[in-house]
Amino acid sequence: MVFSCVYPGCFNIAKPSRLRARTSKGDAPLTFHTFPVNDPERLKLWLLAVRWDVNTPLEKVSRRVLCSEHFSSEDYFLSRGKMGKSRRLLKSAVPALLLQPKEVFVGSTML
């Protein structure tokens, strides 16, 4: 199944590793994270960040993902596993809020 990021205006798609673009050593690979359906308070913050209603049914949220572009580097920690070190999302991580510039009108012109 192909997953796409639900963040407004984001078009990143989770592809199988064999189809992903190679990144340089300094770049962190794009990762995808499911909504925290078992943490109601944090779930509300995630829903607000993507501008969804906080009363969205869990059935709609449970199979949706956000990509790593919407989290800061402080939201991750390094974990050691069978495949070596990997970046893992902190349990307290919340995506960055979508901020849109406000339009300012003076008279009939926009600044």
Image (cartoon, rainbow, N blue to C red):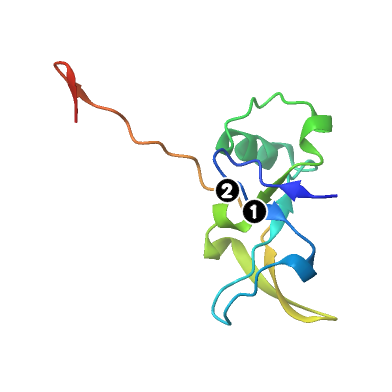
Q: Is residue 17 above or below residue 56?
A: below
From mark 1 to mark 2, how far is it between C-alphas?
9 Å
- Residue 102 pos. (x, y %): 32, 31
| Along the line of sight, the residue nearer the viewer: 58 or 24 | 24
Q: In this view, does 32 lie above or below 27?
A: above
- Of marks 1 and 2, the one in the foreground: 1
Query: In the shown orientation, is residue 37 left or right of residue 8?
Result: right
Mark 1 residue element: strand
Amino acid carrying mark 2 in the image: Pro
| Mark 1 / mark 2, whichever is N-terminal | 1
Which corner quadrant holds the C terminus?
top left
Mark 2 residue element: loop
In percent of the image, x 64 and y 35: which residue is there? Answer: 47
- Residue 13 pos. (x, y %): 69, 52
- Residue 10 pos. (x, y %): 57, 45
Amino acid carrying mark 1 in the image: Cys
| Along the line of sight, the residue nearer the viewer: 63 or 41 | 63
Tag on residue 6?
A: none
**Image-quadrant location for residue 24:** bottom right
State the residue position of label 1.
67
| Along the line of sight, the residue nearer the viewer: 74 or 104 | 104
Query: In the shown orientation, is residue 17 left or right of residue 22?
Result: right
**Image-quadrant location for residue 76:** bottom right
State the residue position of label 2.
95
Few, some or many residues within 10 Å of mark 1 (<14, 14–19, 20+): many
Q: Farthest residue to the top: give it.
A: 107
In percent of the image, x 64 and y 53: which residue is there? Answer: 67
In percent of the image, x 66 and y 48: which residue is there? Answer: 66
Q: In this view, does 31 lie above or below 4?
A: below
